[in-house]
Amino acid sequence: MPEKFIKPALKIGLFGIGLEAYWKQFDGLEKRLRGNIDQVSDSMGKFGAEIINLGLIDTVEKAYEEGRHFRREDVDIIFLYVTTYALSSTVLPVIKRAKVPVIVLNLTPEAAIDYKSINQLNDRTTMTGEWLAYCSACAVPEIANVFKRSNIPFYQITGVLNDPTVWQEIEEWISAAKVANIMYYNRLGLMGNYYGGMLDIYSNLTLQCATFGGYIEIIEVDELSSMRQQVTDEEINEKLNEFSESFEVQIDCSKEELIRAARTSVAMDMIVQKYSLGSIAYYHKGTGNPLNEDTMSSVILGSSLLTSNGIPVAGEYEVKNAQAMKILHSFGSGGSFTEYYAMDYNDDVVLMGHDGPCHPAIAEGKIKVKPLQVYHGKVGSGLSVEMSVKHGDVTLLSVVETVEGKLMFLVAEAASVPGPILEIGNTNSRYKFPIGANNFVEQWNAYGPAHHCAIGVGHIASKIMKLGPLLGIQTVKVC
């Protein structure tokens, strides 16, 4: 049995910069700026991460020392608070040593200088000290120049220290860093094989690990089938009760099919526990092996429960979409498996859904469980789920593998809207896009994503647009 990954808490590095020469010249300036840094640190601490606050770095010697400090602490991301003018030589050694993404905070204490009050001071030295407390913008071009010439990516937040929009930006960067951390330690289970001929689904597994981190566990369907034989009647009854609580089981679902699905669901829980899985992608016909066919035709209910509990399960061995679903879940938005179903030109909406697992936690109402006499395009029959995504704002995410051998995020924001859906025992929803159904479909397709994507609740494109740079992934927002 593999050892469980120990995922450390996110560590945020924070430091401010200043110029040591100022402290003897301007009484109280250093203390004032250190207070601003502490204020930023206290506010960041509310976002659920460990803050490594190095305070004010004002000499080259401190820069070298504190760069090593950040490296020892293994920080995941650095926020550089430019409190006043400072030399770029007090920044570069820190960032080069730490080797993590850096966000430059260009934050002034107030919306504007109180010109009248400062100009009424009789001491020009005191007046200059007051100005320097507002001088954060001065050093940013110098720092940006040095970062560019050193090939160091950087990102900026410019505004007023106590402005809520500034703190929304900071929170989104921290949220994105948390998701990057989750993906780095995620263990993705792959069970079965690709759906033959579905060329857009085939993926470079090494590229996935190189980009996101994590570990890919290759699992035999035979093992899941074997575990099904070990499931007890008591475990089946407990799972049947869970089905009753989680789903609206239709009257035409036979007891035999429910027991079959419950047995498989318990076995899937066992697989997840054994391999410490954080997500799964699966597909397997099971033809020629009755045990495997029985297993793989009864996974939908168990997969849906796992997805709702933060272990997204993607069908058709869609590795890229398992990653997209995990990302949306990690942002707190759900992450359900979907694809185009049809276009409704009368209402200007795109119908999207899929057979297989759903995400009960983001459903509009309770999930319906229905028996299907055939799984279209697949082997076998059994129970399936029918749901729509909650009405309101939604975000679509596709992890795209490009011709250059890289990964790209493709994002769109839309609304899940009420209206008629297909009651065929599949997930399907109606999505309205701000650029219209036609424009969305053509623009989305133009980037060459696979035909699957993940759907989550809320508009979170701004967070994904921050996750992309942290992972070195190009991110495109269609709408």
Image: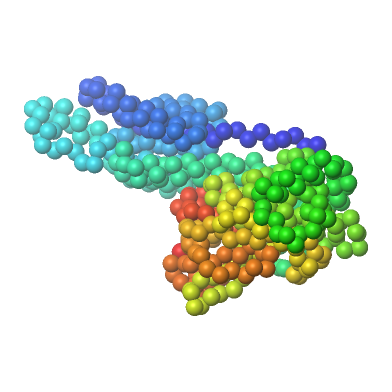
* Residue 437 falls left or right of residue 424: left
Q: Nearer the viewer, residue 470 or 153?
A: 470
Tell me the residue at 44%/42% (across/down).
171
Tell me the residue at 23%/33% (across/down).
132
Q: Position of residue 343 (x, y in %)?
A: 56, 75
Q: Position of residue 382 (x, y in %)?
A: 78, 61
Tell me the residue at 64%/68% (across/down).
423
- In this picture, is 304 found above or below 128? below
- In this picture, is 198 found above or below 363? below
Farthest front residue in view: 251
- In this picture, is 341 found above or below 148? below
Can I make out residue 412 in this image? no
Q: What coloring was used for the rendering?
A: rainbow
Can I make out residue 252 in this image? yes
Q: Position of residue 414 (x, y in %)?
A: 48, 62
Quadrant of image for the N terminus: top right
The tally of labels here is: 0
Q: Position of residue 59 (x, y in %)?
A: 37, 27
Tell me the residue at 10%/37% (across/down).
116
Farthest bottom residue in view: 346
* Residue 84 falls left or right of residue 256: left
